Image (spheres, coloured by chain):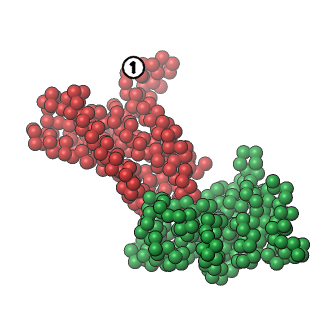
Amino acid sequence: MIEVTGLVKTYGNKRAVDGVSFSVKRGEILGFLGPNGAGKSTTMKMITGFVRPDAGTATVDGVNIATDPVAVKRKLGYLPESAPAYGEMSVEEFLGFIAEVRGFRAADAKRTQVDRAIRLTQLASVRRQTIETLSKGYKQRVGFAQALLHDPPVLVLDEPTDGLDPNQKIEVRNLIKSMAVEKAVILSTHILEEVDAICTRVIIISQGKIVADETPAALRARSPGARLDEIFRSLTRSDT
Amino acid sequence: MKQVSPIFKREFLGYFRSPVAYVFLVAFLVMSVSLAFSRYGGFFKGGVAGMESYFGFFPWLLLFIVPAVGMRLWSEEKRSGTVELLFTLPITTLEAVLGKFLAGWAFLTLAILLSFPMALTVAWLGRPDWGIVVSTYLGAILMAGGYLGVCALTSALTKNQVISFVLSLGACAILLFLGFSSFTATLEGFLPIAAADALANFSFITHFDAFTKGVIDPKDVVFFLSLMGFTLFLNVVALER
């Protein structure tokens, strides 16, 4: 579903992403791991078409983001880091706007999609509240609701469980897991247990380069008996 | 182009979801009406059943008021990060630019049209020439669009609203001052006369004046529309770079 080849992005004289290549198939949940500033978010921004790569290509479902960005964006659900949303709108109004842009113009189609997204992310109790008055956990869920509103075949989630309490984290993970059967999912995270809990594959990125691309089990097998965070540290040590 | 309408709707209603719209509309109407009745406007002293005393201040009033509306158009999206959300939705940059610009323009048009009690007052006091009233309204709306195009562009250049406001004000002020002979005379000092003359043609005041006299010259309409088109084009370029 997602094919990424040789993505490069340079900001000033810092190479944020340096030749990243990977692919994600339907049914896979790819965990994107790395220290802060390693290039995770920049890579996701290039896949979703927000940032233009300096070199390399990204295709989603066979469509190249550079040649037909709008078609790619139709297939994608994207949760940007820290879940930006229009604070002055209520949850319902905001999701209604997303539904309209996503092509659900008729009142009943729009309502169906908004209700479904609200149900999946358990936002019913705050649906009429303005987003700026919500707690961080709810805001995060609004961003999540916005990303899966149109039931996209590909989900790109930048730190989806950031700011959630332990119960909400488990709910969101279960939701991602249940949806991933017929979708391709990329998620970035700092939390190593999350990788163990839901990801079918892990990519560790350090200084803009991929240093590991394997299943969580294979990652563990690199040094038997060691904890995941020890392996993570040894792979990304140069990144400090 | 059908993606313009949800963007337009969200942006336009967005003004009314915060106190911005109400503060703006009240401030604009109080200022414009009190200027007309002030000794500088001379609404009564003029003894004419017309709206010249009201619209005479418009090029100046809009110089401050339009940047107040336009400064947030893109700066706010950049500051709050929603620009990332907006540009990962299936819309083109042009659709987003048009939707937001048209929403701001519609809001300014509403503000201008809400001055209708002035027109009713004039009609009650005397017999105004309605042709002139209508053409003046048209001119004011077009001029507001011209200013807004400039402001939308400067707003796309920065995520700081204050910088955006100051840049807009500066750019709009130049477009306004080009109509004054003292300003163009200074330009003639170091530019060839032909170039200074060409620049003077960009003045808002000269193009707006014709409307206040009841003349709807296609030249003036085209001036404002092409200024909007040009600034919106640059707006797209600024966002895509």
Q: Colour of chain B?
A: red
Q: Residue furthest top?
A: B189
Q: Is residue B160 above or below residue A191?
A: above
Q: Is residue B149 shown left or right of residue B134? A: right
Which residue is denoted by mark 1 in the rendering? Answer: B182
Q: Considering depth in this image, is B65 or B132 the residue closer to the camera?
A: B65
Q: Which chain is green?
A: A
Q: Amino acid at mark 1?
A: Ser
Whether residue B52 is visible to the viewer of this picture, yes or no, is no
Residue B57 position, x and y percent, is 29, 33
Residue A52 position, x and y percent, is 66, 55
User: Going 37% across and 40% down the picture, which residue do you hit?
Assistant: B65
Which image quarter holds the N terminus of chain B?
bottom left
Whether residue A29 is visible to the viewer of this picture, yes or no, is yes
User: Going 34% across and 47% down the picture, which residue do you hit?
Assistant: B23
User: Going 26% across and 33% down the picture, which residue do you hit?
Assistant: B35
Q: Residue furthest front?
A: A166
Residue A175 position, x and y percent, is 61, 78
The quarter holding residue A90 reads bottom left
Residue A12 position, x and y percent, is 72, 45
Q: Is residue A36 shown left or right of residue A63? A: right
User: Going 71% across and 48% down the picture, which residue do you hit?
Assistant: A11
Q: Chain of mark 1?
A: B
Q: Considering depth in this image, is A146 or A195 the residue closer to the camera?
A: A195
Q: Is residue B145 above or below residue A161?
A: above
